[in-house]
Amino acid sequence: MRIASIIDISLVDVPKIPVTVIFTAGCNMDCPYCQNAEIIPRTSGTEMTIPDIAERVRGNLTDGYCITGGEPTIHKDLPDLLKVLRDDGTGHINLNTQGSVPNVLERCLPYLDSIWFDVKTTPVRYLQITRTKHNLWSSVERSIKLILESNVAFWPRTTYVGRLMNPDEIVGIAHVLENLGFEGEYLVQNYVQSSGIRESEIADFEEPSREEIEQVMDEIPPKISLRLEWR
């Protein structure tokens, strides 16, 4: 598995739980607003064995782990890492994913407590936003169904990007989630320009106003609770 970096302790990645954050390297999407663009290439990061990763993170004064990226599920040995972490007596294990590799995700579910699930946009715009060769929505949809059928907490979220997206997309995503059987909180966070975004992409976006989403709050399905987190 290729690892981009490890943060010994974070108080913001999992609500109310201090965790060690493991950034895997490589992603099979190419979202233009990605804030970790330097680790999109599959050749980025450093190759590490599962025992080496476990030894590196073992003993941190945290209550669990957050595995993020990149996209962790492009690594077929991700379930093996999660099993080692769980066998070590870890309290809480969280995964960040965009759900494009359901076969790997399914093997991870027995070792997870929660999943931050990045819903990029509505199904019809997935190809445009993720800039992949094929529309990956069918894989994303399967992943959502797998999580909802499991005992793992499903935390859907979307990064709302000014000039790239519009408020109706958030409404559309909420209805898609409802149709798939989800009830609960759906987090929408604002795009923030950062040094991690490729300079060639920055001019195409802007940090959106909260009011853009507030004007469509009444159109969100009643079983979906929309939470806005403007940073």
Image (spheres, rainbow, N blue to C red):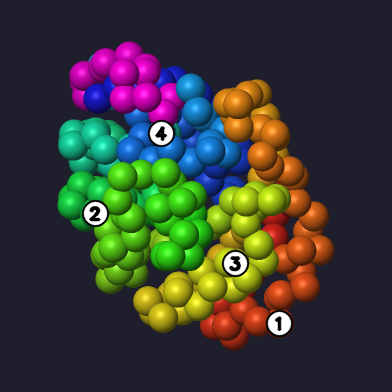
Report the Cα–Cα distance between label 2 and label 1: 33 Å
Does dot 4 land on a helix, a strand or a loop? loop
How many other residues sit within 10 Å of disc 1, few (<14), some (14-19) or many (≥20)? few
Q: Rounded to the nearest whole Å, what is the CA distance between mark 1 and mark 4?
A: 34 Å
**Label 3 is placed on what type of residue?**
Ile
Residue 19 within the segment the image draws in magenta: no
Does the rendering let one see residue 6? no
- Residue in view at x 46 percent, y 79 percent: 178
Q: Which residue is mark 4?
A: 70
Residue that numbered label 2 is attached to: 102
For disc 3, the marked residue is 170
**Mark 3: which secondary structure?**
helix
Residue 133 location (% of width, % of height): 31, 45
The mark nearer the N terminus, 2 or 1, is 2
Instruction: State if disc 4 and disc 3 touch (CB < 8 Å).
Output: no
Region of the chain picked out in magenta, as a range = 39-51
Q: Amino acid at mark 4?
A: Gly
Which image quadrant: the C terminus? Answer: top right
Query: Tag 1: residue type?
Result: Asp
Name, please, the residue furthest toward the top: 46
Residue 227's x, y, as percent? Answer: 66, 64
- Residue at 70 percent of width and 34 percent of height: 203
In the structure shown, which secondary structural element does the residue marked by tag 2 occupy?
Answer: helix
Per the image, the residue denoted by label 1 is 218
Q: For the residues marked 3 and 4, what is the alpha-carbon distance in whole angstroms?
A: 23 Å
Q: Is residue 45 above or below residue 79?
A: above
**Which of 181 and 101 lies nearest the eye of the viewer?**
101
